[in-house]
Image: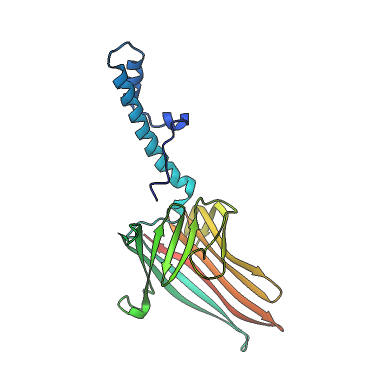
Amino acid sequence: MDRGIWYVSLSNPINFIYGLPSFMYFCILILSTKVKVRPIIVLLCLVATMLLSCENKKEDMSNILGTEYFPLNSGREYIYQVDSIIFDEFNQSVDTITSRLRIRYINTFIDSSKTSSLRVEYDNPDKGYNDPKNRWVSVIKLTQNSIVNYSDTFRTIKMSFPVRNGKKWDANTFNNLPAQIYSYKNVGIPFEILNFKFSETATIQQYELYTPLTEINSYEVYAKNVGMIYSVNTYIQRFDGKVSGKKIITTLREYR
């Protein structure tokens, strides 16, 4: 998280008192007496309180912003099951192809703009890691108010802070592509998949369109302190009683 986001506030009495150690009570007792060193004690007490307030504010800001929905710690690894449901218009059949996707957070580094960045690698663990055609890379950056994914020449705003129901943003702000409006819904709602139960999640609705002929629906679900746990990408067309298109469902199977 960008450390420039949080600030010190002594105007909030809860932050002022919260976490006050025992030596602060000693300071209060000293302040009630007529001791010559009282100005020094006052200064020490104020400094200590400011430091405590800073720490509490840093801890609380992650909850306020929602950065825990997309943790960016190097060493993390996720394995997903990817089900591609294909609707064949000509044969009037439905086939499902299942594969696996592994996402690994490799390491953090400082880029040319002096911004902390995370290298992310993707591959299918069933095809062999050393196959260059089976591995691709992106870079993720945490800015002051968003998470940006750099893939090839595109930059996509994956998340915008704070995370709250109804908040919208243009994921293609940094591209020359048409605007693609993302929005949050179901923030703080529990979500269950397979054997996992997540107490707090947030859904990012990426695209949604329903007509008598077309169904387009793309969204991702993120769990606090985990990351993405589920996504659906649907593009289906119906015409003259025939259905064509594809629906891709990505489900978290393992993570560490």
Which quarter of the rendering shows the C terminus?
Answer: bottom left
Which quadrant holds residue 236?
bottom right
The residue shown at (54%, 60%) is 204
- Count of residue discs: 0
Q: Quadrant of residue 132?
A: bottom left
Residue 126 visible? The answer is no
Q: Position of residue 51 (x, y in %)?
A: 35, 34
- Residue 10 rendering spot, x and y as whole percentages: 43, 31
Q: Nearer the viewer, residue 217 or 34?
A: 34
Q: Nearer the viewer, residue 1 or 256?
A: 1
Picture quadrant of residue 72: bottom left
Foreground residue, 42 or 102?
A: 42
- In the image, residue 6 sits, relative to residue 136, either above or below, namely above
- In this picture, residue 67 sits left or right of residue 85: left
State the colouring used for the structure image: rainbow
Q: Is residue 142 visible?
A: yes
Residue at the left extreme? 37
Identity of the residue drawn at 47% across and 76% down? 98
